[in-house]
Image (spheres, grey):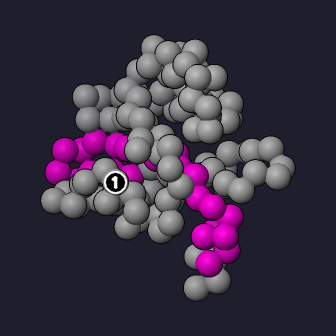
């Protein structure tokens, strides 16, 4: 499951209902990062911020599966990597980056959680 945000009013609405999400409640740094991206970048019709609610096991494959963007050619932009701080003792580690879709010229800013054990496995490869 993921949330697709395209403007600042959607981020404000998500911030207001965040307390009602229970176990799926998003950290404040995630919402702040989404707000900063939308404020900083000039969005077109094809641009968006995507926040994944469920942990991703494998970055690229898991994200493409969830977003269903296989017919398109994607290019990752490692220069826009972000690290989101979470309270100690949580089992999730949040991170993100930006991908471009070559055919539409759109940019998708990804913010997603990974379990710390999956991050360790990925780093070990």
Q: Which residue is drawn at 40% across and 44% down?
A: 1
Q: Which residue is drawn at 40% across and 62% down?
A: 62
SS type, badge 1: helix
Residue 109 visible here: no
Residue 105 visible here: yes
Q: Where in the figure is residue 60, as x and y percent of width and height? A: 41, 65
Region of the chain picked out in magenta, as a range: 99-121
Depth check: 124 or 22 in front?
Answer: 22
Residue at the spot of label 1: 66
Magenta-drawn stretch contains 119? yes
- Marks counted in the figure total 1
Q: Where in the figure is residue 41, as x and y percent of width and height? A: 45, 30
Depth check: 59 or 77 in front?
Answer: 59
Relative to 104, does residue 16 appear above or below in the rendering? above
Depth check: 75 or 32 in front?
Answer: 32
- Few, some or many residues within 10 Å of mark 1 (<14, 14–19, 20+): few
On the image, which quarter does residue 121 sit in? bottom right
The quarter in which the C terminus is drawn is bottom right
Q: Where in the figure is residue 87, as x and y percent of width and height? A: 80, 44
Magenta-drawn stretch contains 110? yes
Q: Residue at x 67, y 36 (%)?
A: 27
Q: Residue furthest front?
A: 22
Left or right: residue 74 versus residue 124 is left
Q: Residue at x 31, y 60 (%)?
A: 65
Q: Residue furthest bottom?
A: 125
Left or right: residue 95 versus residue 116 is left
């Amino acid at each position: 499951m993921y949330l697709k945000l395209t403007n600042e009013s959607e981020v404000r609405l998500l911030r207001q209902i965040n307390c009602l999400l229970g176990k799926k409640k998003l950290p404040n740094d995630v919402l702040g990062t989404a707000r900063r991206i939308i404020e900083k970048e000039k969005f077109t019709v094809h641009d968006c911020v995507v926040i994944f609610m469920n942990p991703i096991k494998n970055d690229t494959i898991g994200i493409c599966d969830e977003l269903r963007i296989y017919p398109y050619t994607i290019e990752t932009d490692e220069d826009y990597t972000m690290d989101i701080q979470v309270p100690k003792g949580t089992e999730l580690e949040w991170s993100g980056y930006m991908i471009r879709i070559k055919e539409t010229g759109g940019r998708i800013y990804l913010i997603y959680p990974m379990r710390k054990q999956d991050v360790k496995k990925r780093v070990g490869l």
